[in-house]
Image (spheres, rainbow, N blue to C red):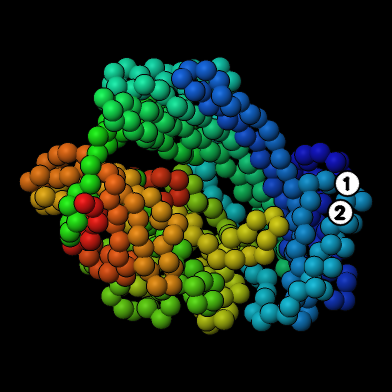
Amino acid sequence: MSRGIIGRGEAEAMASWLLDQATQSKEVRGADTLYFFSESHSLSLLDGEPEENASGVSGGVSLRLIGKDGRQGVAYGNNFSKQSLENLLEWSLANMRASEPEENITLFGGPIDTDDSAMELFDDAVAGSITQEMRLKTCLEMTDTARSRDPRVVSVRAAAWDDGSGESFYASSAGLCGWKRSTSVSCGATVVMQDGDSLEMGAYGKGACHLEDIKYQEYALLAVDKTARLLGGKPLGTGKYTLILPPEISACLVDGIGDLFCASLIHKGHSLMKGKLGTQIAGNAVTLTDDARIRRGAGSGAFDGEGVPTGKTVLIDSGVAANYLYNLQYAAKDGVLSTGNASRGLGSLPDVGTSNLVLSPGDSSRDALYRGAGDGFLVLELMGLHTLNPVSGDFSLGAKGVRMRDGVLGEPVAGVTISGNLTELLQKIAAVGGDLEFFGATGAPSIVVEDVVVAGN
């Protein structure tokens, strides 16, 4: 074995050797191993001048051991020499012995599904055709596009580009093995705008698996347009308002909601969705799914972190809590099958995570939602979503946006707080638009939420 990055044949041989050595121990009931390799490039300009320029490769391997009494131990490293792999075995054994026994720790018996061709997760154009000149040209074009969009742009704080590719190999002592590979590319612009004494900074960007799905000039324009709408914002009067959350904002909300359906959080008492299956938790317009089989989805894959085939799980069905997400351990606890949602890093044990979260779109156009909202509040920024209490559902979020007047965009709004409870907020979702957009692994359309308390002046 070499010390540096290795080829597929060497990675497979390394995994086989690790598993063979690990299972010779009388203490070990089973084992699995994960190898990964990635290459990444990033470039960022500040007002047209290079601010960040980085490229790199990385690789690593981890080994998880399962003891006969349910103890688990994991260790990882990025050196593939024989001595390093022997050390990896010893560290995994030591960590297993130091852990506490757990029930329902097992390996998947198969079969594994490795066919992800229909998902189109790998783009040769990203992996081999993007040059440094292309990255620089794109960032310069975003800078020029943003500057020419509005004379009030005083700085293009960032025109940023990232691209990369990676592959991973999973193998277990149960006889399963499989490769994954994917590419990613993202870009966006951050601008500073000034109008008199008013100064505002805003950004917009997106990512994708395929180069052809990146619309970099459009992102620069949207960054300027969004920021322009916020210039000179003043607080609303305190009261209850109908909120319109565009896709970028509703996607952030969907992220937080999806995590609450992970069975590990349910069992630990860290989710307000505990005991809610079969009950109406949201408006009838709300259907939320976790789908790891979406074409070109950032969270797509044929199998999860335990080798279990992935699929689609409905979490909320027309407002009713329908299912939780599971890995092998928590599925066994509840007497169900794994949903293929095991997530893991090199140095962590398998947990439960989401793949691609999708809030199903409705039929209404964005203009129709605006008209229906009347004198509402279009929210363009929400600050502090990470502070949402996952157990109580309470939240208090800073917000900026635009006041609606008879369904038409009005004056800019800033310095307000949206507070309430997530359970109540979900019940108040009255309409879902047809303008589904993806931001990373989350897809969401615009949504309308009625009677939400907004604290202003």
Q: Quadrant of residue 55?
A: top right
**Residue sitting at x 33%, y 79%:** 278
The residue shown at (83%, 46%) is 79
Residue 58 % position (x, y): 71, 40
Distance (Cα) linking label 1 and label 2:
6 Å
> Residue 219 or 399: which is nearer the viewer?
399
Q: Nearer the viewer, residue 84 or 19?
A: 84
Answer above or below: position of 138 versus 317: above
Question: On screen, 272 above or below 437?
Answer: below
User: Where does the image place residue 6, in percent across and percent down from the top left?
Assistant: 78, 40
Which residue bears the numbered disc 2?
85
- Few, some or many residues within 10 Å of mark 2 (<14, 14–19, 20+): many
Residue 445 in sight from this viewpoint: no
Are dots 1 and 2 in contact, CB under 8 Å?
A: yes
Q: Identity of the amino acid at label 1?
A: Ser
Give the residue at mark 1.
Answer: 81
Q: In the rendered view, would you say 179 is above or below 323?
A: above
**Residue, x 34% and y 51% (percent of image)?**
398
Left-right relation of 130 to 187: right
Give the residue type at disc 2: Leu
SS at circle 2: helix
